Image (spheres, rainbow, N blue to C red):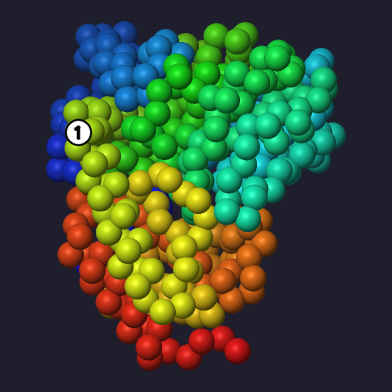
Amino acid sequence: MIYLDHAATAPIPRAVADAMYEVLTEQYGNPSSQYPFGGSMKKRTEDWRRAVAALLDCPAEGLYFTSCGTEGDNWALRAAAWQNRHVGKHIVTTAVEHSAVLECCKWLEREGYEVTYLSPEPDGSLSAARVLEAVRPDTAAVSVMLVNNELGTVHPVADIARGLAARNSKALLHTDAVQGLGAFSARALGADFVTVSAHKIGGPKGIGALYIGPRVRNPRPLLAGGGQERGLRAGTEATAQMAGFARAAELRLERREQNRAHLEALHAAALEKLLAIPDMISIGAGTAPHILAVSLAGWPSQNIVNDLGSQGICISAGSACHQGKPSHVVAALKLPKRAAAGVIRLSFGPETTEAEIDACAQALRRHRDTRMPML
Ligand code: PLP
């Protein structure tokens, strides 16, 4: 199999699986238990928190484990809206957020919030100035993702954070940084909430984390219960997932520079090989090195994904979370019909090789040469 869909989920390195196995089979105590077998797990949860915080470059005491990136997005928006319930009921976000943010915004709309959804430029970019212009005195929260999962575009979150302080110092800033984990510093971003997820970096599915900064006073929990995570995120700690997340974070931190160089080289090589195929065009001004969006203009992307899938090559037509429905991200770019129809995403990880990219490019060329385009 050739796996070029790391933005959907990443393979788990052996060292991560081993770390989880040890916790599952030997260190299975509940961190809340009073005897040493439990107490030692409590200490380990703090070690794991520190390991993940090191990758984010944030204070460990501001980092809370969650069940996934989706939970982090929902918690952040709800906590921001709650803190600023007396500031106003306006939220600013983008039309290209992950559905975890968009659907949560729709819930908030049903509760009386007004949400401004900013559309990006045709190349997928969105300037800090446009975000800040949309901010009003009654804006409670601003939510702008760091790296778009379908295009690889990087949004200017640090500039938004700086500008927000002058425009509306009460509005809280959330960034969904799930696709950027390992490539940013939360301190440098300056957002009040930063969402991440383990399974995009070689950790297990079913665990994420939310960084909550000091401007958030008494953050409102999403779940009521047993007081875990310093009373803010109830639920018995998913210790094996935490161990796996921490080990994946350590591996990413240790190899950060070499991974980045590898991904940048792959991205450049892939773009060159794909654009050599007739009718292939590049989509968006994405600069994240692990995500590449292109379009085989005129060839429906779902057919491409199915054809390559049947040959054991895994790529994606937009986000895997959309399950075959037209992507809201591609729609927001307002591309010509044929270009929009053929948008596919290749995404890479540290394990990806140039030979795999070659095989994918050949399969795409065969598809172009042997399948009928749309009318
Ligand atoms: N945000 C972005 C940008 C994502 O790409 C994803 C996963 O696809 C999520 C949030 C949701 O993360 P999780 O799968 O951990 O719920």
Left or right: 338, with 363 as reference point: right
Q: Is residue 105 above or below residue 294?
A: above
Residue at the image position 27 percent from the left and 39 percent from the top: 260
Camera-side residue of 272 and 114: 272
Pick the quarter of the image with the C terminus. Answer: bottom right
Q: Please name the amino acid that badge 1 sits on.
A: Arg
State the SS at label 1: loop
Whether residue 30 is visible to the viewer of this picture, yes or no, is no
Q: Residue 218 or 144: which is nearer the viewer?
A: 144
- For image coordinates 74% across by 23% down, the residue present is 140
On screen, 338 above or below 16? below
Q: Is residue 368 visible?
A: yes
Horizontal and vertical percent position of residue 276:
35, 73
Residue 275 as seen in the image, left or right of residue 12: right
Spot occupied by residue 339 in the image (x, y as percentages of width and height): 56, 71
| Picture coordinates of residue 61, whole percent (x, y) | 42, 10
Q: Identify the residue at horizontal 27%, vertical 77% (top origin).
A: 362
Q: Which quadrant: the N terminus?
A: bottom left
- Residue 240: x and y in percent read 28, 32
- Displayed quadrant of residue 198: top left
Q: Quadrant of residue 126?
A: top right
Rendered residue at 37%/76% (across/down): 277
Q: Looking at the picture, does residue 315 appear above or below residue 54?
A: below
- What residue did someone put label 1 on? 255
| Residue 127 relative to residue 8: left or right | right
For label 1, the crowd category at 10 Å Cα-Cα, with few meaning under 14, some 14 to 19 and many 20 or more, is: few
